[in-house]
Image (cartoon, rainbow, N blue to C red):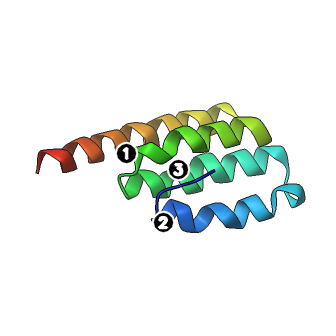
Amino acid sequence: MVLPPGPAHDRWPWIDERRQLVSRRAYARWVLARVAGLAAAAGEPQAMGGLWQKARQHGRAGIVDVAQFLVYRLVAALRARRGSRR
C-alpha cells in the first residue's frame, strides 16, 4: 500500500513488518486507531481507504475500532475541506 508522505506513512511499516507477530485484532486496532489517527491529524483523507482495506484484509476489527476509525475519517475529511478553503 502506498501512503502519502506524512505521519501515517512513517508508522505504517512498523506494524506491517510485525503482522505475523501480533493478533489479527491488535493489527486492525493499530491500523485503524494509531495510523488512521495520525492520518486524520495530518489531514490525509486519501490514506483512509487503504488503511481500511488493510485492516479488513489482515485484521479483525472490533466495533470500537470501527467507530473510532469513522470518527478519524470524518476529522480528516473536515480538515482537508477546511484546508482547501484557505
Q: Which secondary structure, mark 3?
A: helix
Residue 3 visible (yes or no): yes
- The correct choice, above or below, for 9 with respect to 73 in the image is below
Instruction: Residue at 54% x, 33% y: name it.
Output: 67
Q: Are marks 1 and 3 in contact (CB under 8 Å)?
A: no
Amino acid at the residue labelled 3? Ala
State the mark number for residue 43.
none
Q: CA distance from mark 2 to mark 3?
A: 10 Å
Across and down, in percent, residue 13 comes to: 68, 65
Instruction: Point out the tag, 1 or 2, that comes first from the N-terminus.
Output: 2
Residue on which disc 3 sits: 36
State the mark number for residue 76.
1
Amino acid at the residue labelled 2? Pro
Residue on which disc 2 sits: 7
Compare residues 15 and 33 and report the one nearer the observer. Answer: 15
In the image, farthest residue toward the front = 2
Instruction: Residue at 44% x, 44% y: name it.
Output: 46
Residue neighbourhood size for the residue with mark 1, other residues' Cα within 10 Å, grouped as few (<14), some (14–19), many (≥20): many
Amino acid at the residue labelled 1? Ala
